[in-house]
Image: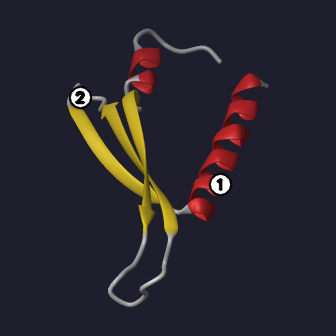
Amino acid sequence: MEFASGEEETVCASYATLKDFDWSMRLVLSSSKLSGLRQPLVQLKLEKIMPDGTLQEKMVELDTAELDRLLASLKAAQKAVLR
């Protein structure tokens, strides 16, 4: 695909860029409704650079099933990029 002068920079600048990430594992032992929960959770902190240059931080908490789905989608995205 060919771009007119300056058009390529506009297309690339419209996406946020991942700057850094951090994760931690938590084990929820109980809740107000269940005394024996024992559910592992992953907390994922993402820092991204927005197109306007500002830094934005997002915190995501995932259970085991959600983490598996996230990893599967990231693997699929990697395969698509490599093609």
Determine whether 66 is above or below 71 in the image.
below
SS assignment at label 1: helix
Question: Would residue 14 be visible to someone looking at this image?
Answer: no
Task: Locate residue 64 relative to residue 82 in the image: left or right.
Answer: left
Measured as percent of width and height from the top left, residue 18 is found at 41, 29
Residue shown at the point (76%, 32%) measured from the top left: 79
**Residue 75 in the image: x percent, y percent?**
70, 39
Q: Secondary structure at mark 2?
A: loop
Residue 19 in sight? yes
Vertical relation: 58 (above or below) 37: above
Residue farthest along the top direction in this orientation: 5
Q: Which mark is residue 68?
A: 1
Q: Amino acid at mark 2?
A: Asp
Quarter of the image where the N terminus is located: top right
Q: Label 1: how many residues lie within 10 Å, few (<14), some (14-19) or many (20+)?
A: few
The quarter holding residue 27 reads bottom left
The image shows residue 78, relative to residue 65, as above or below, that is above
